[in-house]
Amino acid sequence: MLLKEQTDERLMAEVALGNLDVLKVLFDRHHVHIFNFLYKMCGDKMLSEDLTQDVFYKVIKYRSSYKNGKFISWLFTIARNSMKTHFIRNKESHDDLEPISHRLTAGETGRQEDYSHLQMALNQLEASDREAIILHRFHEIKYAELAEILDSTPGAVRTKVSRAIQKLKTIYLQNS
């Protein structure tokens, strides 16, 4: 069977055994998803690129800790932890991130117009609510997998996502 036809879990099992060449397939499949998640969370393109590289470095570094679970859950857990570690080391709180639209400088105001109304509403949510929506709705991660990533239960995650979506709707409609 060709590498590209194998599941993420099978490929990661190969990486865990030391076949690092296989990581290229996983990187090609998922680096855009990881970058987009990080960018939607922090709003900094350069930082998101650096953190994406860090995530895949950690996949190699901690490959022996992979225990044949759902690869995408493991990967997004690494991404979340990398982002949190970055903000802790830089004495910034992940939960206190200013909305992306408010951090644009005067020279970037033209780009501000490019942000969609939905993205601006997302930016006004608390980081934990934004994260839950982005992972569930944009990256289509199921509640059970999201519960694993967030270290919670599927029921609690379902409730969190539902409440976050209600908050998002309220913000979206207020800014219309």
Image: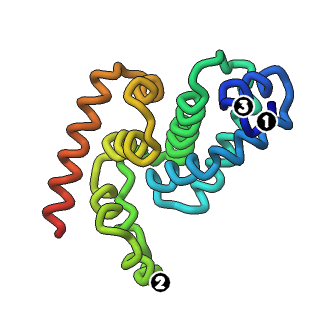
SS category of the residue bearing label 2:
helix
Residue 53 in view of the camera: yes
SS category of the residue bearing label 3:
loop
Report the front residue among 133 and 38.
133
Placement of the N terminus among the 4 image quadrants: top right
Answer yes or no: do the residues labelled 3 and 1 have beta carbons within 8 Å?
yes
Q: Where does residue 172 sit, x and y in percent of width and height?
A: 21, 60
Q: CA distance from mark 3 to mark 1?
A: 5 Å
Residue carrying label 2: 107
- Residue visible at 58% across and 54% down in the picture: 48
- Residue visible at 45% across and 48% down in the picture: 92
Amino acid of disc 2 = Gly
SS category of the residue bearing label 1:
helix
Residue 136 in the figure: left or right of residue 39:
left
Q: Quadrant of residue 175?
A: bottom left
Mark 3 or 2: in front is 3
Mark 3 is surrounded, within 10 Å at the Cα level, by few (under 14), some (14 to 19) or many (20 or more) other residues, namely few
Mark 2 or 1: in front is 1
The label number, if any, that marks residue 6 in the structure image? 3
Amino acid of disc 3 = Gln
Going from N to C along the chain, the mark reached first, 2 or 1, is 1
- Residue visible at 29% across and 67% down in the picture: 117
Amino acid of disc 1 = Leu
The label number, if any, that marks residue 3 in the structure image? 1
Q: Where does residue 83 sit, x and y in percent of width and height?
A: 53, 43
Going from N to C along the chain, the mark reached first, 3 or 2, is 3
- Residue visible at 39% across and 63% down in the picture: 100
Q: Where does residue 103 sit, x and y in percent of width and height?
A: 40, 67
